[in-house]
Amino acid sequence: MLSFHYTGYSTIEDIAKRTVENGNANEKHVCVTSLKLLADFWTLRIIVALSSGKKRFCELQRAIDNINPVTLSKRLQKLEKAKLIHRQALDDGISVMYELTKKGAFALPVIDALNAFA
């Protein structure tokens, strides 16, 4: 079982470096990678916005307080690469729909726990 204790390190990168130095990278690497992915304000908001169902790019932009389109695009690419969202091009050749994958839906209880912790 994985347990975390406050180590005095200020960033996830510091924790990851220390984990590798201690030789415990196998077990904790996945957790650190996940934290790095979710440790972004906009990424969390995108996942929450998609929790209610499929959305087009412009719908996401409106749902997330008019996030800058470049920022939204970069975060969507990162989430798609991590297989947390699915991107589907529509028949019109212009529009794209985004939705959470099963893996992405597994992030929702984690986000709820973070909200409860805060």
Image (spheres, rainbow, N blue to C red):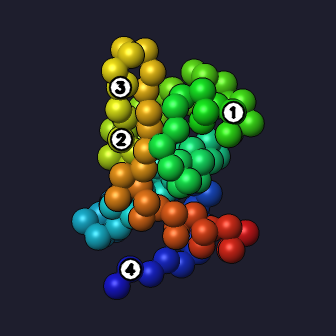
- Residue displayed at 62% across by 57% down: 10
Tell me which numbered mark, 4 or 2, is placed earlier along the sequence.
Answer: 4
Foreground label between 4 and 2: 2
Percent across and percent down for residue 18 are 42, 61
112 vs 63: above or below: below
For disc 1, the neighbor class at 10 Å (few under 14, some 14 to 19, many from 20) is few
Give the residue number, with chain letter if any, for mark 4.
2
**Secondary structure beneath label 1:** helix
Left or right side of 45 for 15 = left
Amino acid tagged 3: Ala
Q: Which of the labelled discs sits on residue 86, or is there none?
A: 2
Quarter that holds the N terminus: bottom left
| Numbered disc 2: secondary structure | strand
Q: Is residue 118 left or right of residue 61?
A: right
Q: Dot 2, crowdedness within 10 Å: few (<14), some or many (≥20)?
A: some
Q: Which mark is residue 62?
A: 1
